[in-house]
Amino acid sequence: MKTRTKGIVMNKKMLTLILGLLPLTVSAADKVCSQGEEKIKQTQSELLTLDLEQLMNLQITPLKNTQAYSKTPASVYVITDDDIRRLGASNIPEALRYVPGLHVARIDASKWAITARGFNDRFANKLLVMIDGRSIYTNFFGGVYWEDKDVFLEDVARIEVIRGPGASLYGANAVNGVINVITKTAEASETHQVTFRAGSQDKAYFSTRRLVQLGRNTCGRFSIKYADRDHSNAAAGGNLADDWDVLRFNFRVDQDWDKHNALTLQGDIYNNRVGQSSSNIFEPPFGPVTNFNSDNRGHNLRLRWHHTVSYQEATTLQAYYDQYEQESQVIGAQKITTYDLDFDHQIQLNDQHSLLWGVGFRLTQDRFKNTLTQTLDPRRRTDHLFSLFIQDDITLIPDTLHVIVGAKFERNDYSGFEYQPSARLSWNISPKQTLWASISRAVRVPTRAEQDATVVSAVIQPDVLLFQGISPHQVLFFEGNDNIDAENLLAYEIGYRTQLGKRLSLDISTFYNRYKHLRTIESDGFAFSADPIPHFQVFTTDDNRSDAVTYGVEVAADWRATDAWRLTFSYSYLDVHLHIQSKSQDVFSDSSVGSTPRNQVFLRSAYDINADWEWDAGIRYVDELSTLEVDSYVSVDTRAAWKINPDVTVSMVMNNVFDQHYEEFRQGVFGILGAEAEREIHGQITWQY
């Protein structure tokens, strides 16, 4: 209870500070970026009425150079701002629910397991996630703190999802996929907006945004968001103490310095209180459920300068600073500070070669407070990352045949020098048909915890073991290994994308992946101790004694049945084969085989009943997670929205319509209790003015 109170006090302090800044934005808001207001309204109208051909020609940047979606030689899926709105999503994971080939599973009220093409986990360490090019992947556990790395969904322009390696451009850990959340420029945002939401799980949600004219060519956006989510039902019955609340302030300022230079400055300040329920596996008496809170807070600042030399040449310089702090009963206190600098240069050398290259440097400093359950040696560490990439887009036959070759070279403090090349072929068979193929190498770098941590990972209750007439516990320890190598992947992909008439498009991707040096957990001896009670200490450590092969297919179709009705369908199949070396004593890696469903089927419908009413519905089938003992399930979601007038919209969303509760994932570490996804309903009102 003490931790919870502290979190609320801190939220109030930050809220006071933020509200003190608002008068500055309000007083300047009389002139709301007036030069761009008509452009904003026009852009919104176009986005809401994109026909199939416009969507296929949507300009995206998954390979850093701008390309039409239909001609991109990669397994790409784009979620537009209109998709997010019509999904009724309240956070990034919910917006990703219907992406083909992506496995999105709720662990509890605030935590998610998300990955592409296998090996899902609370910290899916083979998926790189970015917000406006700023990496939110943590190298402590490897993965993303989804409960902390949130955005204002109303400010998102689109989410680009790459299934498959993106390491030749984005670097290490972009192994199975890349997610880049791209926010709107301040000028391209709606004017002012206020949103209220309340429901069965989202107890309270409030966000407000103001658009401010800061100068002749400078526009600013200032936003505040507060969300309070209720606790979940435990898979074993009863309620968990996993309720969650977050307070976040965000700003973005865009300046068109002149026709050749554009500057962007944006940042976040946030404070979260995350509840958690755990079985007491760390100290006697063992067994009873313990409830605790984690106070998470952070801030970041990003500066980007884009310089257009000519229509054939441009440079981009980006720098960002990020600090994250967490105080938890389980993993103690941590503070991680990141400084990052990147420079990109794109130039059209001639009619055949478009060259893109860049260099980068990242410095990460961390500090940890050790606990009974987790210690790090050293407690403080500073890591450096140096990188260089180069990519050449070669036109073999104009408007028909392209080859993109490139590689990224990195030097990190965990596995040393890494190289990650790729080659992609794009053949535009016709203006509406594209066949593409690729071969790529990617690596997953060892984490701080894998090298430097000692963790009490489980306490096994006494059963038939006897020692001098006493039934001792078995305490399972994990000890880091600073000699562990990077995991690596060699991926082969073939895809086909076509537009069948004016109303139907089809996207098919196939892949074959070979993983080497995957992480295993090996036995490292045992000992007996009588403190604080008699117990055996069983030690484990990291090694690289496993390989794997995965293959599958992903199919997505988009059908505009009428001008007012859109249907999207996707099917994905994944097969995972793990090969553990004979000398390995690993008994845990098998769980990764069944941590991602073999089959997934998604169907979404978006129907405009008339100019004022919208009705959206979706159905998702997710296959069983065999090694996690999670059954397959079918979930149905629906949304209805009424535009009362041009400025005010009221909507109602219901998730899991026909199933009161079911389990989607099991975390299985630190004694964390499993939660169920519940039937949810919430109402929302949005006012733009």
Image (cartoon, grey):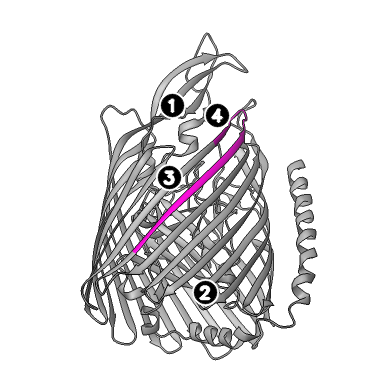
Tell me if residue 364 can be seen: yes
Q: Earlier in the sequence, mark 4 or mark 1?
A: 4
**Contact? badges 4 and 2 (CB < 8 Å):** no
- Under tag 1, what secondary structure? strand
Name the residue type under label 3: Leu
To which residue does mark 3 refer? Answer: 628
- Image quadrant where one finds the N terminus: top right
Question: In the displayed structure, would residue 382 be above or below residue 20?
Answer: above
Quick one: 209 or 3, which is closer to the camera?
A: 209
Question: In the displayed structure, would residue 183 be above or below residue 441?
Answer: below
Closest to the camera, between mark 4 and mark 1, is 4
To which residue does mark 4 refer? Answer: 378
Quick one: 35 or 616, which is closer to the camera?
A: 35
Real-space Cα distance between discs 4 and 3?
34 Å
Percent position of residue 539, x then y: 46, 23
Percent position of residue 213, x then y: 68, 78
Question: In the displayed structure, would residue 195 be above or below residue 139?
Answer: below
Asked whether 377 falls inside the magenta stretch, the response is: yes
Label 4 crowd (10 A; few <14 / some 14-19 / many >=20): few
Name the residue type under label 4: Pro
- Which residue range is magenta in the image? 356-381
Label 1 crowd (10 A; few <14 / some 14-19 / many >=20): many
Name the residue type under label 2: Asp
Q: Earlier in the sequence, mark 4 or mark 3?
A: 4
- Residue lying at 51% horizontally and 77% vertically, measured from the top left: 82
Closest to the camera, between mark 4 and mark 2, is 4
Label 2 crowd (10 A; few <14 / some 14-19 / many >=20): many
To which residue does mark 2 refer? Answer: 81
Query: For this view, does 5 lie left or right of residue 552?
Result: right
To which residue does mark 1 refer? Answer: 540
Q: Earlier in the sequence, mark 3 or mark 2?
A: 2
- Under tag 4, what secondary structure? loop
